Amino acid sequence: MPRDQYQSSMFQSQTHVLKLFEADVEYWPQLYSQERGLALYRQLLEEVDWQQDRVTVYGKQHLAPRLSRWFGEPWMDYSYSNHTMKASPMTPLLKEIQVKVEKCNGERFNSVLANYYRDGSDSNGWHSDDEPELGRNPAIASLSFGAPRDFHLRHKRNKDLKHKMTLENGSLLMMRGSTQTYWQHHIPKRAHAHGRINLTFRTIVRTY
């Protein structure tokens, strides 16, 4: 079924399509109201058992510059930067948010990576969400709660192709199609920023 059949007219009117070469990116600036977004930020901050993982970058181990938690079915291991995360069961709140996201964009997800950026010194380096367990041309739904943060995109081959935007409290960013094949993205440090929680819903496929 075409994904636009899932979308209500309200969601469609709020959608911003980013005109990027070899990418399919959409942005809903206010999937949740400001008040509801902040309430969800506080609830997730309290309910999630946040942890700081060790990742390997250029052959050296470092503490990740943010806190994270991986949710899904027991078999859904997720690996990046030579670190494998074991899945915790999805909570009722995460399932509630997932339903809203799926109704908005017509995708179906089975897992979510939660990231907590404690302040402006927490960040995420340049990367693509192109791990084998995500399959070919994965759909990634990225929700933001709490403080706004800058979000940068750059084309892998043509470094002149770049895009910068701000992910607001209560917003949804959808990346689909060939986006992860041809583009990288990151969250840079931001002076004086307060806490932000990011939920990235994904679909894990069996690779064996």
Image (cartoon, helix red, strand yellow):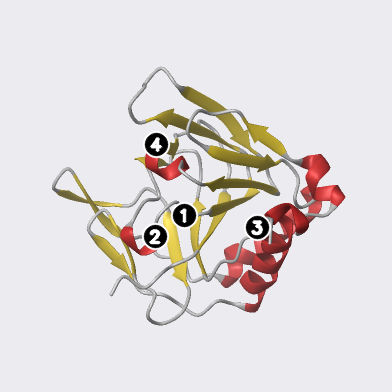
Report which residue position mark 3 lands on. Answer: 41
The total of numbered circles placed on residues is 4
Tell me the element at label 2. loop
Dot 1, how many residues are within 10 Å of its Cα: few (below 14), some (14-19), or many (20+)?
Answer: many
Tell me the element at label 3. helix
- Residue type at numbered disc 2: Gly
Are dots 4 and 2 in contact, CB under 8 Å? no
**Foreground residue, 176 or 125?**
176
Dot 3, how many residues are within 10 Å of its Cα: few (below 14), some (14-19), or many (20+)?
Answer: many
For residue 72, the mark is none
Dot 2, how many residues are within 10 Å of its Cα: few (below 14), some (14-19), or many (20+)?
Answer: some
Mark found first going from the N terminus, 1 or 3: 3
Mark found first going from the N terminus, 1 or 4: 1
Q: CA distance from mark 4 to mark 2?
A: 15 Å
Can residue 125 be seen here? The reply is no
Report which residue position mark 1 lands on. Answer: 138
Choose mark 4 or mark 3, whichever is in front.
4
Q: Name the image quarter holding the N terminus.
A: bottom right
Can residue 151 be seen here? The reply is yes
- Residue type at numbered disc 4: Tyr
Q: CA distance from mark 1 to mark 4?
A: 12 Å
On screen, 150 above or below 69? above
Choose mark 1 or mark 3, whichever is in front.
1
